[in-house]
Image (spheres, rainbow, N blue to C red):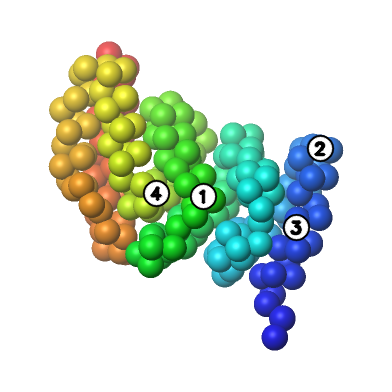
């Protein structure tokens, strides 16, 4: 039986070098189609990404997701966040089965990126807060050690942040477990954290 995800991803692997070298994602119609495709692919066939892409292809693929976060409108940014979230959910499942590999670690960098570059600064992704916080919480569940390391770095950046950072860390706990209720609860707490953080940063 033919796996639809395998077929789509095979075509994508042919296009990835062209996308990277020819800046095709600068063309609006192509970029929208590309991000719709990868968002749907990762929602329905995340395992194909990890199974079929070699490390170099996977690195290029993730670089296009970061490009989407950095340079495009809310529609594409939302699809990129959902892509990260779905890949991370698959990673969490693999972690529970003790079946992680080198590629599952690549997503860890998005946690630091989203916290440092997007939460602290005012960007277009602020308009996608529910999706943003859901993605961050999913990443936290997959990479809690990286999360607490990043919080430590943020505390060094400004000592006035210590109280709200410690409160967020205590609210989440050392080993957060992914589920819908916990994600919704995190969104409320994280919104309060970001509001307080930006208030302190403006002083």
- Quarter location, residue 196: top left
Residue 37 at x, y = what percent?
68, 60
**What residue does disc 3 label?**
12
**What residue does disc 4 label?**
139
Q: Earlier in the sequence, mark 2 or mark 4?
A: 2
Spatial distance from mark 2 to mark 3, Cα to Cα? 14 Å
Spatial distance from mark 3 to mark 4, Cα to Cα? 25 Å
SS under mark 4: helix
In the rendered structure, are the residues bearing label 2 and label 1 in contact, judged by CB atoms less than 8 Å apart? no
SS under mark 1: helix
**What residue does disc 1 label?**
102
Left or right, residue 11 beside residue 50: right
Left or right, residue 176 beside residue 31: left
Q: Earlier in the sequence, mark 4 or mark 1?
A: 1
In the rendered structure, are the residues bearing label 3 and label 4 in contact, judged by CB atoms less than 8 Å apart? no
Q: Residue at x 55, y 54 (%)?
A: 83
- For the question of whether residue 169 can be seen, the reply is yes
Spatial distance from mark 2 to mark 1, Cα to Cα? 25 Å
């Amino acid at each position: 039986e033919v796996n639809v995800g395998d077929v789509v991803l095979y075509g994508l692997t042919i296009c990835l070098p062209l996308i990277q070298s020819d800046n095709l994602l600068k063309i609006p119609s192509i970029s929208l189609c590309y991000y719709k495709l990868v968002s749907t692919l990762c929602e329905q066939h995340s395992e194909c990404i990890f199974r079929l892409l070699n490390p170099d292809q996977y690195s290029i693929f993730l670089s296009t997701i970061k490009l989407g976060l950095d340079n495009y409108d809310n529609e594409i940014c939302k699809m990129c966040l959902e892509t990260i979230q779905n890949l991370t959910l698959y990673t969490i499942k693999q972690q529970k089965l003790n079946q992680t590999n080198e590629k599952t670690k690549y997503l860890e960098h998005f946690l630091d990126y989203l916290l440092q570059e997007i939460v602290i600064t005012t960007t277009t992704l602020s308009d996608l807060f529910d999706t943003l916080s859901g993605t961050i919480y999913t990443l936290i569940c997959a990479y809690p050690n990286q999360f607490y390391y990043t919080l430590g770095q943020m505390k060094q950046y400004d000592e006035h942040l210590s109280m709200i950072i410690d409160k967020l860390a205590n609210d989440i706990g050392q080993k957060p477990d992914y589920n819908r209720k916990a994600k919704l609860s995190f969104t409320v707490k994280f919104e309060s954290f970001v509001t307080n953080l930006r208030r302190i940063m403006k002083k």
